[in-house]
Each structure stands twice: as C-alpha cells, then as structure tokens.
Image: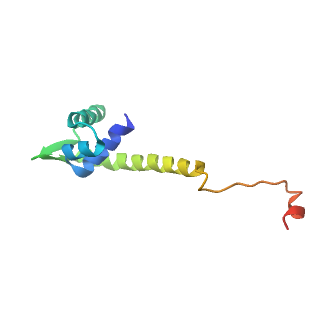
Amino acid sequence: MKIQNIEAFCRLAEVEHYGKVADELGIAQPSLSRMIHRIEDEVGVSLFKPSGRNIKLTKMGRLYYQKVRKGSDEIQSGADTIKNIVDPYFGSIDLGFIFTLGPEIIP
C-alpha cells in the first residue's frame, strides 16, 4: 500500500468530496477514484458510500480512518524528527571528553 494512497484516503475521509480532494492533491478525479478502489480491494470492504453529490465513510471506513490516521501521524512525526536532527540550525550537540581530563579543563 502506497503512502500517497493512504494520504489521499485520509483527506477524502475528511472532506468527503472527490472533486475537491482531487483539486487539492493536483490529480484527476478518476486517478483519485482508482487510488481509493485499490485500498478498498486490499482491505476487502467498501470504505465510502455515495450520499447525493458527496460521499460518506461507511462504518468500516470510519474504523479504518482512525487507525490509518494514527499511522500517518506517526510517519510524519518520524520524518519531522529526522529533519530536525540533521538540520544544522536546530537540535543539540553532543560533547564528549575523557573523564580524567575533565576536572583540569572544566572546573
């Protein structure tokens, strides 16, 4: 399962409109629809149901969204942590010294 598909699913679950989400993501609506169908094929259930011109999450879709949102947040948190560690203008510096020299150099 691709992370782009998961992010598209999460955004679609929040907005509940294919056209708006496709515009936000900069992709065609049929491409977004295929992404969602791939996810539905992998999990084996329908995640959305039509509701007029919009869509709504099914019961399984809401459950899946809760779990996937947590995972997506963790992935983003991990990426942010790594970016902050390697950023030369942010983070901390680890210093080490030989203990026997410490009391003479650092009072």
Q: Which residue in the rendered view is the most extreme toward the left?
A: 52
Q: Is residue 15 above or below residue 1?
A: below
Instruction: From the top left corner, tell me how far across and down residue 68 is, in percent.
Output: 36, 45
- Vertical order, 32 against 97 (above or below): above
Q: Residue at x 38, y 38 (%)?
A: 3
Residue located at (26% from left, 48% from top): 13
The quadrant the C terminus occupies is bottom right
Front residue of 55 and 40: 55
Q: Is residue 31 visible?
A: yes
In this image, 107 relative to 67: left or right? right
Asked whether residue 58 is in view, the answer is no
Residue pictured at 55% horizontal, 47% vertical: 82
Color style of the picture: rainbow
Quadrant, the N terminus: top left
Relative placement, left or right, of 17 versus 71 is left
Q: At which x and y percent is residue 89? A: 60, 55
Residue 84 lies, in percent from the top left, at 55, 52
What is the tally of numbered marks visible in this picture?
0
Measured as percent of width and height from the top left, residue 93 is found at 68, 55
Snapshot quadrant of residue 25: top left
Left or right: where does residue 100 sit relative to residue 81? right
